[in-house]
Amino acid sequence: MPILDTRVPAVLLRIDRNPFHHGTLGAVRSLGRAGVEVHLVADSEGSPVRRSRFVCAMHPPPPPGSSTADIAAVLRRVAARVSRPAVLVPMDDESALAVSRLGEELAAGYLLPKQPGALAERVADKAELAAVCASVGVPHPVTLIPGSPAQAAAAARRLGLPLVAKWSRPWLIPAGTGLRSTVVVRSAQEARALYSRTDEAGSRLLLQAFLPPGPDRDWFFHGYVDRCGVTHGGGPGRKHRAWPRGAGLTAVGRWTPNPQLQSLVERLTEVLGYRGIFDLDFRRDAAAGRYHLLDFNPRPGAQFRLFEDGAGLDVVRALHLDLTHRPLPTPVPLPGRAFVVENYAPFGALRPRSAGRELAWHAVDDRAPGRAMWGLWARHVSLRLTQRAGRPVRGPAAADPDGSADTDGTAKASGTVVGPPREPAGTAVRAVRVTAPAGERASRADSTVVRPRGRVPRQGRRSAQVSAALTALSSGSLAHSPADDEKASNC
C-alpha cells in the first residue's frame, strides 16, 4: 500500500440521500486503511456507512437542492472543525459540480485538483458532453436537442424508434415529479409529451439514438489525472451484471484489459486538459465495433475499488498522494480482478471467494456496515414486495435504489423519492458519540449519530427477511417492473 501523508485528513462529501451508495464506503475504507483521518459529510440516518470503524466523524450535509452558497457554508463549518487543510473528495454529481465552482473559495481549507475553467460542469451536463465528444472526435450516440414539442416529435421520427430520452442535468429534477433521468421513448407522441415537462425537469431534453445492450457491450473506465496530466489508479472494466438487468449500475464487474478503450480515454483527458478523478461509461456498437461515451462523471464511480492494483493504488489514494505532493507508485495492473455488490448480485457474492475479488459491503476488517446493509436491504425488499402486491404500506418507505440509481449507483433525483427507513415504532434509541480528533470539541449536530437500542429483531426473523430478499432478486421480481424496463437504454 502506498504511504499516504496521515497528517492530512480527508473530507468526503455526498449530498444525495441514497443509503445504499457503496462507493462512499469504499472511499472511507480506502483512506482509513491507509491511516488517514476520514470525515464524512453525508446523511447518517439509516446509512450503513456510518458504522464503519474507519469513519472518524460524521457531519450533516447540505439538503438536496441547496445553493452553491449553502454548500460552501457547510464546507467552511466542517473545515473549521477539522482545523487543518484536508483533501476534499466529492462523491456525487451535485457535490462534484459545487466543489468545481467553489475551488478558489475553498482553497484555504481544502486541497483540490486544478481543474481548468468549468470543465467538470461541461462534461457532467449530458447536452454539453455530446458537443465535447464531437469537438474531440470521441464516438457518442447521435443526439438531438429539440426546441419545441413539434421538434421533439420530428427528432423522434428522424432518429428512429425506439430512442433514448435524457434530461441534460438529472440532478436538478425535483423529487416527486415522477420524471426519470433516462427513459426509452417508443413513439413521437411520447417524445412530444416528455418535452412539455422541460420546465418541470429543470434542464434540456435530449433525444438520442438507441444503442442496444448485449454481452460484452457495457464498459467503464476509472482513473485519476495528476497535475502533470498522467493517469493513475484505474483502468478499463467490463460490466458482467447490471441492476436492473440489461441496464443500470454495475452489480458484477471485472478489470479487463482493453487497449482500444485505454487509448481513447487517454486521448480524451489529454485534449480536455482534465485533472482529478473521473468515471466514464461506454457502450460498444456491435456493428461498427466503436466505443460510444455515454457518461462522464467528474468524481469516483461507485465501483472504483475494483481497480486497486498490486501496489495498493486506487483513484482515491492517488488523489490524496498527488495533492499532498507524495510520489505515486508505478502502476501494477491486476487484470481479472472482480468487484461484486452483494445486495444487487447476492448469489455472485456467495460463491467461493478468491484473492482477486472484492465485495462492496463485506470486509473482514470492517464487518458492521455489511451487517447493517443486509438489515436495511431486507426491509427495502419487503416494502417493494408489499407495494407490488398492492397492499397498503405503513410507515416510512426505504430509499429505492433500483428506481433512482444512476449507472454507478449514485442516486438520481428522479421518480418518487422517499427517505430511508426509520427504526420500528417502540424501539428505544441511544445517542452514540463518534470519536473526534484529539483536542477537537465537535458540536452535537456534527458528531452524534443514532443507533438502535432495546428491541432487536431475532436472528431467525432477520434470516427470513434476507432469504426473501435473495429469492426476490433471483426471480427477477424486483428487477423487472415496468418502470425499470424503461432503463434498458443508453444510461
Image (tube, helix red, strand yellow):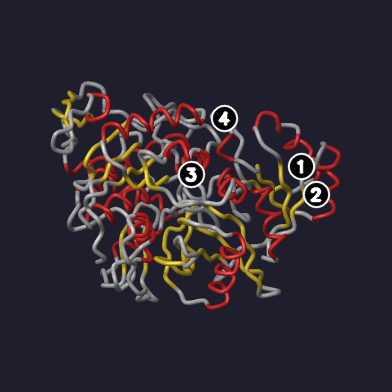
Instruction: Estimate the spatial distance between the alpha carbons at disc 3 and disc 4, rounded to whole Å.
Output: 19 Å
Q: Position of residue 273 (x, y in %)?
A: 57, 60
Q: Amino acid at mark 1?
A: Ala
Q: Looking at the image, is mark 3 or mark 2 earlier in the sequence? A: 3
Circle on res. 96 = 3
Q: Amino acid at mark 4?
A: Pro
- Of the two numbered discs 3 and 2 in the rendering, the one whose residue sits closer to the viewer: 3
Q: Amino acid at mark 2?
A: Ala
Q: Position of residue 260 (x, y in %)?
A: 58, 76
What residue does disc 4 label? 174
Q: Amino acid at mark 3?
A: Ala
- Of the two numbered discs 2 and 4 in the rendering, the one whose residue sits closer to the viewer: 4
Q: Secondary structure at mark 4?
A: loop
Circle on res. 400 = none
Instruction: Estimate the spatial distance between the alpha carbons at disc 3 and disc 2, rounded to whole Å.
Output: 32 Å
Instruction: Estimate the spatial distance between the alpha carbons at disc 1 and disc 2, rounded to whole Å.
Output: 7 Å
Residue at x-position 46% and y-position 27%: 70
What residue does disc 2 label? 156
**Tags 2 and 4 touching, CB below 8 Å:** no
- Most foreground residue, 479 or 284: 284
Q: Looking at the image, is mark 1 or mark 2 earlier in the sequence? A: 2
